[in-house]
Image (tube, grey):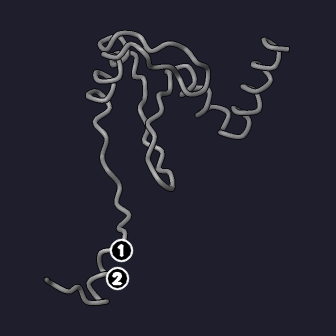
Amino acid sequence: METISQAEVRLSAVKTHRRTLLDVDAALRAICSTGKGRCWYCDQRLPRAEEAISARWNVQRVEGKRVASIILICPTCQVELARMGEEEFLRNLSLRVCNVVC
């Protein structure tokens, strides 16, 4: 039976942080094939693959503690987010949702 030294155990526990490049077009094709994608912010339904690609939907990988998540962002929300900044965009978005629901 092979024994493992303490140094080997420590080495195996080391985690590296590296960014994984995401092929947005390939990701959109894969997600569109399920028919279930929606914009993370406004809940707009993801169109068919070619339309989503030509409209420039965005796919982002959000790193979590245990797993990474993939979110979709529609072109309208991308423009508004860039124009307003994240804080104001989210505030306006929450007001829109409240006005619809309340």
Q: Residues within 10 Å of mark 1 (few under 14, many from 20)?
A: few
63, above or below 70, in the image: below
Q: Which residue does the image show at 38% across and 64% down from the upper left?
A: 17
- How far separated are the C-alphas under marks 2 and 1? 5 Å
Q: Which residue does the image show at 71% across and 33% down from the upper left?
A: 90
Query: Looking at the image, which is closer to me, 9 or 53?
Result: 9
Residue beneath label 2, please?
Answer: 10
Left or right: residue 82 compared with residue 15: right
Q: Could you tell me residue 43's position as x and y percent?
A: 58, 18
The residue lying furthest to the right in this view is 102
34, above or below 84, in the image: above
CB atoms of marks 2 and 1 within 8 Å: yes
Q: Residues within 10 Å of mark 2 (few under 14, many from 20)?
A: few
Query: Looking at the image, which is closer to me, 1 or 52?
Result: 1
Residue beneath label 1, please?
Answer: 13
Secondary structure found at label 1: helix
